[in-house]
Image (cartoon, rainbow, N blue to C red):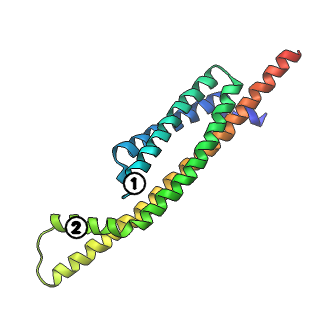
Amino acid sequence: MSSDYCCGIEIRLGTIILTVISLIIYIFFASVFFAKPDIVSYGLPRVLTIVFGVLFILFVLNSIFGITGILFKSPGGIKLYAYILWGAVIIYIGLIAIVVTNIIRSKQEAIDLCIKQAGKEGTQNVGESAKNTNNNIKEDCNNREVAKILINSIVLILSTLFTMSLAIKSYRYSNILYRARIKKIVL
């Protein structure tokens, strides 16, 4: 039966593997939001970075809970894990909106900071070469910020889709366990 498989392998093992991967993703995001929040979004208020960091720590704990539920074949625990994953998807959507909006809003400020830092590192040029260097620096800084918007958006969207997929697979696995228990009780 096709519902007994996850990513081409047995659903229990597949769900464990995906949950471990999500655990690693959540640890990464929690550490980024606590240690270097400017990587995700320059100028994001510190309170928001702490809130998102705490949420990702809760998602880490949820992943540990999910792994435990899967290992002990607890359909209720796995279903609760799947419901919390759907909550994570909603939070991811909010995170995407906040981070991308903030990056776009503070783009010029980040470009100005980049230009200022590049100006301190560069040598003092004279005349026409100084104008060319300044234009190159502005263009490089602008390109860096556009790339940052795209990369952050893509990473967050892929993380959201991965979490959605894991929620679906976890819910499906809990239903398989429920059906197996019902068959044992009836027989």
Q: Is residue 145 visible?
A: yes
Q: Comparing marks 2 and 1, which lies closer to the viewer?
A: 1
Task: List the residue tagged with mark 2.
Answer: 116
Query: Which of the two residues, 168 or 11, is positioned nearer the viewer here?
Result: 168
Distance between mark 2 and mark 1 Cα atoms: 22 Å
> Which residue sits at x=47%, y=36%?
57
Quick check: 166 left or right of 61?
right
Residue 79 in percent (x, y) is at 69, 32
Label 1 packing within 10 angstroms: few (<14), some (14-19), many (20+): few
* Quadrant including the N terminus: top right
2 and 1 marks in contact (CB < 8 Å): no
Residue 133 in percent (x, y) is at 21, 76
Q: In the figure, 69 relative to 85: above or below?
A: above
> In the rendered structure, which amino acid carries the disc numbered 2?
Lys
> Which residue sits at x=48%, y=60%?
100
Quick check: 180 left or right of 110?
right
Q: In the figure, 137 relative to 65: above or below?
A: below
SS class, disc 1: loop
Label 2 packing within 10 angstroms: few (<14), some (14-19), many (20+): few
SS class, disc 2: helix
Residue 89 in percent (x, y) is at 60, 46
Quick check: 147 left or right of 154?
left
Q: In the figure, 64 relative to 92: above or below?
A: above
Task: List the residue tagged with mark 1.
Answer: 45
Q: In the figure, 119 relative to 31: above or below?
A: below
* Quadrant including the C terminus: top right
